[in-house]
Image: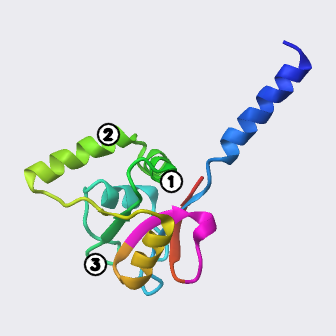
Amino acid sequence: MNLKHLLSGLALAACAVASQAQVAVVVNPKSAAAAMTADQVAGIFLGKTSTLPSGATAAAADQAEGSAVREQFYAKVAGKQAAQVKAAWSRLVFSGKATPPKELGSSAEVKKFVAANPDAIGYIEKSAVDGSVKVVLTVD
């Protein structure tokens, strides 16, 4: 392999890494939660718990199925792929134990939902964060 091939391979690898944007888990600015662990967040988004650390019932907002930010969120926070998440929710819904997070079409919609709902939790690209939401966890 010559140097030119090696460098182009490294450039492609760098692009692949750069396309993985940081994901921010966000809550309403009025929420008592200041920080959350990945396990706490995963528990809410996988139906293991329905409450925020404050004890309030969480209103979770998911990104659209198949979106890159959703894939990255579940892989980094819960260590699960889309099919595993779907299967887990199918079991919970069938058994009547839980209701899946509200699915929204974009980070802008998730941010709007979280900003308007004191008990909401969602995740968006870190670059989309502004004063309308509060970050409780960031994942690379």
Residue 125 covered by magenta stretch: yes
Q: Identify the disc placed on residue 41.
A: none
Residue 9: quarter of image: top right
Write down the quadrant of residue 44 in the picture.
Answer: bottom left
Which residues lie in the magenta part? 121-131
**Residue at 9% across, 50% down:** 95
The image position of residue 36, as x and y in percent, is 45, 66
Classify residue 24 as left or right of residue 49.
Answer: right
Q: Position of residue 101 (x, y in %)?
A: 29, 62
Mark 3 and mark 2 lie on one chain; the one further toward the N terminus is 3
**Residue type beneath disc 1:** Val
Number of labelled discs?
A: 3
Nearer to us in this view, 69 or 106? 106
Q: State the residue in front, 18 or 79.
A: 18
Q: Residue furthest left?
A: 95
Magenta-colored stretch includes residue 115: no
Q: How is the image coloured?
A: rainbow
Judge the density around disc 1: few (<14), some (14-19), many (≥20) Cα neighbours within 10 Å. many
Q: CA distance from mark 1 to mark 3?
A: 26 Å
Residue 83 pos. (x, y %):
33, 38
Name which residue type carries label 3. Ala
Residue at the limit of the structure toward the bottom, as seen here: 30
Q: Quadrant of the N terminus?
A: top right
Which mark is in front, 1 or 2? 1
Residue 135 is left or right of residue 115, and the answer is: right
Report the residue marked by disc 3. Answer: 56
Question: What residue sits right under mark 2 in the picture?
Answer: 84
Q: Secondary structure at mark 2?
A: helix
Spatial CA span between label 3 and label 2: 27 Å
